[in-house]
Image: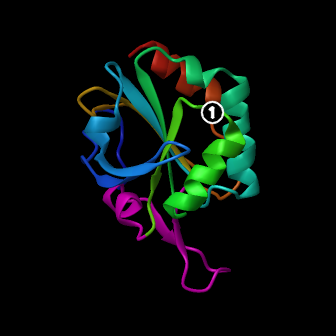
C-alpha cells in the first residue's frame, strides 16, 4: 500500500534535478528543515503535470519556508531539467524516476493499459516532516483527478 499518514517514507535515492544539473540524492538529503511535499506524476510534460505544476507556481509554493517541493516522474534528468526551466520556479526540484524504483518504493507503480509496456506512479502527494513521517497523503484513484491543493497547503502550514 502507498504511504499513509503516520508512515515513514523510505529514504529512496534517485537523480535529483534542479533545472540545470542533476545529482544522485536521497529523499532525506533533499528535504527542507521542516520537511517537504512530494508530488508524483507520470511524465513531466503531460498535460496534467503541466497544469498542476503551473498551479503550484501561481499559488506561491516556491516561497514555502524550509519546506522542499519535490516532484517525481518517469522522465530522464534532461527532460526533468527542461520541465523545471519551463516552470521557471527555481525552488522546485524533481527526482528522475527513470526505472520506476522511486514509484515502486512508494507502492505507486501501475501499468498503463493503453500504453504498451509503460508503468507510471499513481498521481499523488505526500507531505512529510524532516524525519520523512507522512503528515498528509493523497493518492488519486483515477488518472485525471486534481490534487486537493488547499489540503496540501494546510498540511504544509502545520509542519
Task: Judge whether residue 78 is colored magenta.
Answer: no
Q: Residue 150 location, x and y as percent?
A: 63, 23
Q: Residue at x 63, y 29 (%)?
A: 149
User: Residue 1 location in percent, x, y?
Assistant: 35, 56
Residue 14, quarter of picture:
bottom left
Residue drawn at x 63%, y 55% as measured from the top left = 44
Considering the numbered disc 1 on the image, is that residue within a helix, a strand or a loop?
Answer: loop
**Which residues make up the magenta segment?**
99-122
Tell me where residue 115 appears, x and y as whole percent: 64, 80
Taking 149 as reference, is 31 left or right?
left
Residue sitting nearer the eye, 138 or 23: 23
Image-based side of 103 in relation to 44, left or right: left
Q: Quadrant of the C terminus?
A: top left
Determine which quarter of the picture holds residue 100: bottom left
From the top left corner, tell me how far across and down residue 28 is, in percent.
26, 37
Q: Is residue 145 visible?
A: no
Return the residue at label 1: 148
The answer to whether residue 58 of the structure is visible from this angle is: yes
Amino acid at each position: 500500500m502507498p504511504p499513509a499518514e503516520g508512515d515513514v517514507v523510505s529514504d529512496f535515492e534517485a537523480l535529483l534535478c534542479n533545472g540545470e544539473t542533476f545529482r544522485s540524492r536521497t529523499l532525506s538529503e533533499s528535504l527542507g528543515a521542516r520537511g517537504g511535499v512530494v508530488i508524483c506524476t507520470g511524465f513531466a510534460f503531460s498535460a496534467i503535470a503541466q497544469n498542476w505544476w503551473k498551479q503550484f507556481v501561481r499559488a506561491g509554493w516556491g516561497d514555502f519556508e524550509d519546506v522542499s517541493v519535490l516532484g517525481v516522474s518517469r522522465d530522464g534528468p534532461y527532460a526533468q531539467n527542461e520541465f523545471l526551466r519551463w516552470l521557471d520556479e527555481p525552488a522546485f526540484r524533481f527526482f528522475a524516476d527513470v526505472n520506476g524504483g522511486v514509484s515502486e518504493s512508494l507502492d505507486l507503480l501501475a501499468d498503463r493499459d493503453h500504453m504498451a509496456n509503460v508503468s507510471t506512479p499513481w498521481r499523488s502527494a505526500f507531505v512529510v516532516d524532516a524525519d520523512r513521517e507522512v503528515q498528509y497523503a493523497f493518492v488519486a484513484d483515477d488518472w485525471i483527478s486534481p490534487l486537493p491543493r488547499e489540503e496540501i497547503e494546510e498540511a504544509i502550514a502545520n509542519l
